[in-house]
Amino acid sequence: MRRSSMLRAALVVGLVLAGLSAPASAASAEATSAPVRASDGAYVTGETVVGPRLVDLTIQSPALGGTANVRLLTPDGWEQRRRGDRWPVLYLLHGCCDSYVSWTRSTDVASIPELRDVLVVMPEAGAAGWYSDWWNGGRGGAPAWETFHLREVRQIIERGYGAGQKRAVAGLSMGGFGALSYAGRNPGMFRAAASFSGVLHPLRDASFWLPFFGRTGLDPYALWGDPVAQRRIWAAHDPYHLAKRLRHTALFVASGDGTPGGPFDPPGATDSLEALIYQENVDVVDRLREVGVTVETDFYGPGTHSWPYWQRELHRALPMLLDALGTGRGAAAHAVAR
């Protein structure tokens, strides 16, 4: 054999041996295993490790007519999980005009010790998706965010990513609406729900919220229709009108009132949005108590519609959320929060 041929052969053997000894890449791992699928055909097209205990899933979604991402904050031992291993699940929902990265970007959620035995699921919900299957003039179809979250994402993480049957949900602003609306529209799915500055009674302030529904260039009436002509659809999503259906869900509702003097605000800062949301929250809490539903509240007075308050309220809600999930960490979370 010529010297050049011998060198080429040695190079090929070396590359093969190197490939055998190196860890499998994400692409090769995906190629050798079937993607996790939901019952309607939604499936995972990719997984990306974005930080310690943080994994992003890309899901091809029939409900959305495209792809969307979900960020997982994984519990201890998750990477070594075996078939049948299950963890309780906390869904964290983002607010309007933001995305699935917002909770890890703007809070300390990834470093909370009491969440190290919980699978935290942070799904994309559209900049202004409003946690709903859009009405679209009665035609339905995409975007169907409720179907994406509660059928496609739920089935995928339960079938392939260690999610168990114990679930809680929490969110801020638009996500606070989503948390209570999802729990009310799906009794028994969530053991607990928490809202931080949530839009909890949109029908009360319909003329104010309609412009928000069109933030992404969509027809604002495509979400639930006209608040008069399609009042039934609005009410079917509005936590105020879902109060009786929340009887068996542990609840936490928090809001500032938009007045100056909040600990995380510049001197004299006010917030008319938080003031409006506060009135909605008070109305919903009054309604819950009127129909016999127990709800824990933190109406903390001065404060704006901003992340420092939502991070603090997540900590304050954690004891209730963890107790509902049965992690045994509620008492520890309570000591830290207070």
Image (tube, helix red, strand yellow):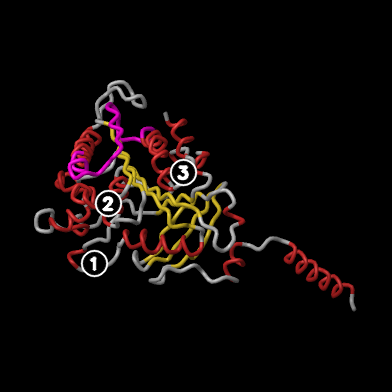
Q: State the separation of the CA atoms marked 3 and 1.
A: 32 Å
Q: Is residue 222 magenta?
A: no
Q: Position of residue 231 (x, y in %)?
A: 12, 55
Asked whether 16 or 285 is in front, the reply is 285
Q: State the separation of the CA atoms marked 2 and 3.
A: 23 Å
Q: Is residue 110 above or below residue 26?
A: above
User: Type of residue at label 2?
Assistant: Ser
Q: State the separation of the CA atoms marked 1 and 2.
A: 19 Å
Disc number for residue 104: 3
Residue tagged 1: 140
Q: Position of residue 322 (x, y in %)?
A: 43, 43
Disc number for residue 72: none
Disc 2 element: helix
> Comparing marks 2 and 3, which lies closer to the viewer?
2
Highlighted magenta segment, given as a residue range: 286-309
Residue tagged 2: 181
Task: Kindly identify the residue that appears in the image at 42 percent across and 28 percent down.
Answer: 338
- Cβ atoms under marks 3 and 1 closer than 8 Å: no
Q: Residues within 10 Å of mark 3 (few under 14, many from 20)?
A: some
Disc 1 element: loop
Residue at the extreme bottom: 1
Task: Kindly identify the residue that appears in the image at 28 percent across and 42 percent down.
Answer: 198
Task: Kindly identify the residue that appears in the image at 24 percent across and 26 percent down.
Answer: 259
Task: Decide which of tag 3 and tag 1 comes sooner along the chain.
Answer: 3
Task: Kindly identify the residue that appears in the image at 52 percent across and 50 percent down.
Answer: 74
Disc 3 element: helix
